Structure formats: structure tokens, C-alpha cells
Image (cartoon, rainbow, N blue to C red):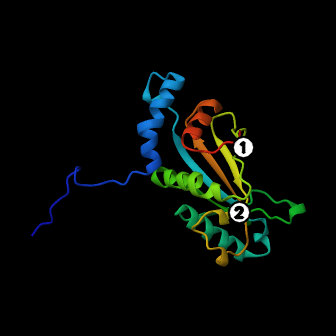
Amino acid sequence: MAAKQKTAKEIKVNVPRLKKIYAEKIAPELIGEFGYTSSMQVPRLVKMIVSMGVGEARENKKLLDAAVTDIGIITGQKAVKTKAKKSIATFKLREGQEIGCRVTLRGAQMWEFLDRLVNVALPRVKDFRGVNPNAFDGHGNYSMGITEQIIFPEIDYDKIEKVMGMNVAIVTSARTDKEAKSLLAKLGMPFRK
């Protein structure tokens, strides 16, 4: 017997919660706020880059492997090891040496990660007063640093090699910082007042 093909209506696609909120509520608000004439002008998230620099990986390769594992657990995607672009004698660094790792998130994984970052991880930071509202680059992209990877609930505190920080860069299609800040604030980013 031939297996019955599923039609487009029968296939259920899991749309991330934050993406659904963006499409139904935030995009129309941005159109009203900035007076866009086309829905294609509305700022949207393009990608998120999560990176971790491990300078001590020169002496201890185990730390770099632990960082790759941690980022993989946090983002749900395998990290790529990054290499030094040039030699720096003061830091005892040679060109081509592995000194960090990074992950580029797009699509559903990006939306899920942003949702967990804003609603679960950032509220777990000690003495948290909000993220820096001035960390935009002038082209609508936002960068922030996280001091400990243990703020994510996926990380088991007893199994980590060393507490390390990470950088999160959020790339948007916004043309100005004002538009990008409005988009991120509506998505729930807790900016410092």
C-alpha cells in the first residue's frame, strides 16, 4: 500500500513564540510608529552571532573544547572554532592558533535563542539593571556582553570547566539605531533607563 502524502494544510509548522508576536503585533506597531509605506521597510532580525573568546586556550586546549560544548548546549547549534588572524608576541599568540568559538543563528533557532535570552537568562544575572541602550553600531545592529555562561538554565554548574563570558551580536535590517532600538524594546529587550 502506498503511503498517503500529507497536504500543506495537514503539515503543522512550529513557529517560534516571539516570531509570531513580531508578525501579529510588533510589525504593525512599527509601521504606525515610523510611517512605513511598505511592509518590506519594517525592521526585522537578520541573524544573531554568539561568540566566546578563550585566550587561555593557548595553554589548555580542554578549555576551548568546553567552550564549544557550552555554546552548543546554549544555542542548540554546533560552534565553529575561530583562529587568530595574526601573531602578537606580547600575548604569546601565533597566527592560526585556535583562540575562541562562535555560532551564527538564523531563522527559528535565532528567534528561540532571543526569547530564552530576554525572558530566562538576563533576569538571572546578579544585580541586573538592564542592558546598555547605547551599544548600537550606527547601522541598527546591537552588541552585548554576558559575563557568565551559567545564567542559561541549560548549563549544569557542576559540569563546567571554567566560568567564561560571551558576546551576543544582534543584526537587524533597520537603517537607524532608533528603529533598531524600538524593534528590540518591543521584542522585550530590557534596556537600562
Measuring 45% from the left and 46% from the top, which residue is drawn there?
A: 19
Q: Is residue 105 visible?
A: no
Residue 121, percent from left and from top: 61, 58
Q: Position of residue 82 (x, y in %)?
A: 67, 61
Q: Measure the C-alpha gap from mark 2 to mark 1.
A: 17 Å
Name which residue lies at 15% across and 66% down. Answer: 3
Which disc number belongs to residue 148? 2
Screen quadrant of the N terminus: bottom left
Judge left or right: residue 53 versus residue 174. right
Q: Residue furthest right?
A: 90
Q: Is residue 22 left or right of residue 147?
A: left
Q: Amino acid at mark 2?
A: Glu
In what quadrant of the picture does the C terminus appear? top right
The kind of residue on which mark 1 rests is Asn
Between residue 20 and residue 86, name the one nearer to us: 20
Q: Would you identify the image quadrant in which residue 72 lies? A: bottom right
Above or below: residue 11 compared with residue 45: below
Q: Residues within 10 Å of mark 2 (few under 14, many from 20)?
A: few
Q: Earlier in the sequence, mark 2 or mark 1?
A: 1
Q: Is residue 147 above or below residue 161?
A: above
Local packing at callout 1 (Cα closer than 10 Å; few below 14, some 14-19, many 20+) is some
| Viewer can see residue 48 | yes
Q: Residue furthest left?
A: 1
In the image, what residue occupies the spot 29% across and 54% down?
12
Q: Quadrant of residue 73?
A: bottom right
- The residue to which callout 1 is attached is 132
